[in-house]
Amino acid sequence: MNGTIEVQNLKKHIGEKVILGGFDLVVPSGSIVALFGPNGCGKTTFMQILSRLVMADSGQSIIHGFNKRKFSYISQQYRETLLPWKTNLENIAFPLVLAGEDQEIIKKKVSEIVELFESPIPMNGYPYQLSGGEQQILVCMRALITRPEVICIDEAFSALDYENGLRLRMHLQTYWMKYHPTILAITHNPEEAVHLAERILVLSKNPMRVIASVDNTLPYPRTIDTIKSELFHKVKDQVLSAFVRVTHV
Amino acid sequence: MKNIAIGITIFLLLWALILIFGIIDTFFLPTPLQVLTSLKNLFVSGKLIQDTAMTLARVGASLLIALGVGVPTGLLLGRFEKMYHSVEFIIDFFRSTPATALFPLFLVVFGIGEISKVALASFAATLIVIFNTAYGVMHAPKYRRVTAELLGATHRQIFWHVIIRESLPQLLVGIRNAVSWVLAVVVVTEMFIGTNTGLGRRIIDSSITYDISGMYASILVVGLIGYLLNALLLLIHKRYVHW
């Protein structure tokens, strides 16, 4: 089905080090899956292969019905990916300009996304005038404006303070509930994983493998109350127990 | 503005000290008042205006050529680094050679008229513009290009939306450099043969006829042109390359 991510026997080594030694993964169309694992386990390399930034040695990574314009990749280097010579508005609208959309449609879509994010960011300012949190919000708005069907998130919230991280997760959830894209999110924050995902895959390193799959049936929208709930903590405990088994903390 | 006033005061003070202690004969270094009077007279008679206009026209033409040739070439060479490295030696060699040393050669090739002057000045400036533009493109961080690619940009769009903008700060440094060079080359070549107008011509003529105040007045104008052009470019830099 379109939007399904299917990875089979993916192999990649960098120098002597085996990053991926036959990695398998399926993310069903329209679902949210989180990858939770230790630092340096190869999550980012995997994402780069999936986004076609890096070539794998062998194996397959397919996004069914892949369309460059319906795919968004949100990385942790938000500051560097904004263009300082464009205003905040022009940065958000950039993917639409690249796609050759006309001004009317761009205007409409920008106001839709600004509304969704309830963003107080001044649109005529420049990215370098914003705080880190605001910059990441801008990057997310840019990633979502094309109404992507597949979104890959690589620790996009890790550099943010708790409040902004939480806010961004809420916005992403709202977007997902409205349009149901396939979302694959890498994180090293268990709360983030359990907040967003329907399924959390716990990873080991050297090479990267899925060592546990935790299903998370908490209903959406997941609010602050959900995060405080007992069930939330139960799922989080399951994730952490699996994590402790690989990392031997 | 305040700093400029302080600078001028120090400059005049040094000038006065040299005169008071007789370090240089007053025949060779007139008082500031004499120079300013001479400047006023030359200005009123219209001769200085004509020479200034002529020098500015040569500087302008040379800069336009340097930008017209240098910017596209620099962008292209910066984009295709292998190409840049294969011509790097030529650029570096001629960039390091004082352009004025090549003037006799240019006289032989382009004749003794206007063309050889503008050709030499634009030759020197083009190399500086090429070098700086290419450098700006090559040394810009790559992640913005990767981002644009991920957002679905074509090669042409990446070039227009990212690469050209990335090269701007270094390009402006290059242009300021080029302006200094062009002014120097134009004034020096005016001192040689092939023209009766221009500030360089006026400086050398005043020197030969011992119109020392007139010489200083002309030098002052040249300095002022250089200073103002530089200030203008700085203003453009701050206004349009704000990041």
Image (cartoon, helix red, strand yellow):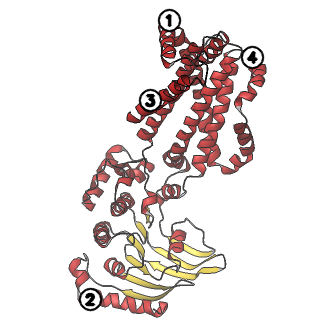
Residue placed under numbered mark 4 in the picture: B111
Q: Residue A155, labelled with which disc?
A: none
Residue type at mark 3? Thr
Q: Answer left or right for B97 relative to B44.
A: right
Residue type at mark 4? Gly
Identify the residue shown where x is 46% and y is 39%: B237
**Disc 1 or disc 3, which is closer to the eye?**
3
In this view, the residue farthest toward the left is A225
Closer to the camera, A56 or B70?
Answer: B70
Residue placed under numbered mark 3 in the picture: B9
Q: Residue A231, labelled with which disc?
A: 2
Chain letter belonging to callout 4: B
* Distance of label 2 from label 3 (alpha carbons): 78 Å
| Image coordinates for residue A151, horizontal then vertical, percent | 41, 67
* Distance of label 4 from label 1 (alpha carbons): 32 Å
- Tell me the crowding category of disc 2: few under 14, some 14 to 19, or many 20 or more residues within 10 angstroms, Cα based: some
Residue B169 in view here: yes
- Tell me the crowding category of disc 3: few under 14, some 14 to 19, or many 20 or more residues within 10 angstroms, Cα based: few
Q: Answer left or right for A11 relative to A133.
A: right
* Distance of label 2 from label 4 (alpha carbons): 90 Å
Q: Answer left or right for A215 relative to B58.
A: left
Residue placed under numbered mark 1 in the picture: B45
**Disc 4 or disc 3, which is closer to the eye?**
3
Residue A69 in view here: no
Q: Secondary structure at mark 4?
A: loop
